[in-house]
Image (cartoon, helix red, strand yellow):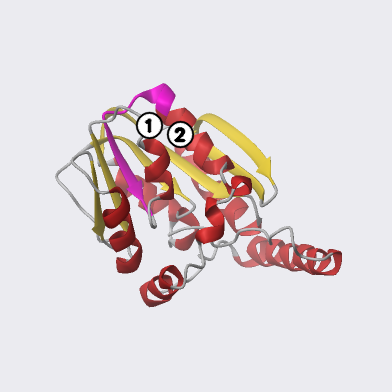
Amino acid sequence: MAGGDLPPENKNTGGTLDMERIKELARAIVFALVGYRPQHVTPEMWDREYRDGQWEYLRKMDSIAGLVSILGYCDFLKPASILDAGCGEGLLAEKLKLLPYKSYLGMDVSREAIALATQNLGDARSQFVVADAWLFDTPERFDVIVFNQSLYYLTDPAGILKKYRALLNPGGRIIVSMVDNARTRAVWRLIDPVFGIEDAMTTTQGKGTVVTKVMRTD
């Protein structure tokens, strides 16, 4: 998984940006009235988008803010084991290779994305698997579990974090990073009261604002 409700690229005209602001205001009203609704994308849609290279723009300089935030937290926490839930084709995995972790597991529902990640980044330390987030299970335990631009595609965000909390080693952390918009603010309203926040970082680039939080899991 990747991207999703990302802001429009800078090439848009002022009129298009005004229309996006109107749409975002409408979304905010809808979420306030009816509550959170996940962004729905089927595995087949994900596969087609990865085959067509639709997420290549995330490799540009103006899309690195969220990745760098997660990298910084992981550098500080020094996890030996990392689970990347919704890893896509491995944009975060590529950055995390700078760290001396012992094992990284990237999981995504898209077979196309996992094939790309395995081909380009798979090695003795880094592995990738195809799995649905709700059905995924493993005997492994992790020091850090990351949801990078993936949580707002899932129903019951608090419930999924509770499920994955059971996969943490003692003292482990969950890191959630999401672009800031009406949908993701609805997600934060659901998960912040349940888990609390150990630390948070907000970064802004050409593509918009990204909020990254280290969630309390004790």
Q: Is residue 134 magenta?
A: no
Look at label 2 and name its amino acid. Answer: Leu
Q: Nearer the viewer, residue 46 or 177?
A: 46
Q: CA distance from mark 1 to mark 2?
A: 9 Å
Position of residue 104 measured from the top left corner of the image (x, y, whole percent): 27, 40
Question: In the rendered structure, are the residues bearing label 1 and label 2 in contact, judged by CB atoms less than 8 Å apart?
Answer: yes
Position of residue 14 measured from the top left corner of the image (x, y, whole percent): 85, 64
Residue indicated by mark 2: 71
Does residue 158 appear in the picture of this structure?
A: yes
Look at label 1 and name its amino acid. Answer: Leu
Tell me the residue at 38%/31% (across/down). Answer: 98
The C terminus, quarter of image: top left
Position of residue 47 measured from the top left corner of the image (x, y, whole percent): 38, 72
Is 141 situated left or right of 93 in this image? left
Mark nearest the camera among 1 and 2 is 1
Residue indicated by mark 1: 98
Q: Is residue 85 magenta?
A: yes
Is 56 situated left or right of 138 in this image? right
Q: Which residues fall within the magenta stretch?
A: 75-87
Q: Is residue 16 above or below residue 92?
A: below
Query: Which comes before the other along the chain, label 1 or label 2?
Result: 2
Q: Is residue 86 above or below residue 193?
A: below
Q: Mark 2: which secondary structure?
A: helix
Q: What is the quadrant of residue 165 in the picture?
A: top left
Tell me the residue at 43%/61% (across/down). Answer: 154
Is 84 situated left or right of 182 in this image? left
Residue reaching furthest to the front? 120
The N terminus, quarter of image: bottom left
Is 148 situated left or right of 84 in this image? right
Position of residue 214 measured from the top left corner of the image (x, y, whole percent): 47, 33
Does residue 215 appear in the picture of this structure?
A: no
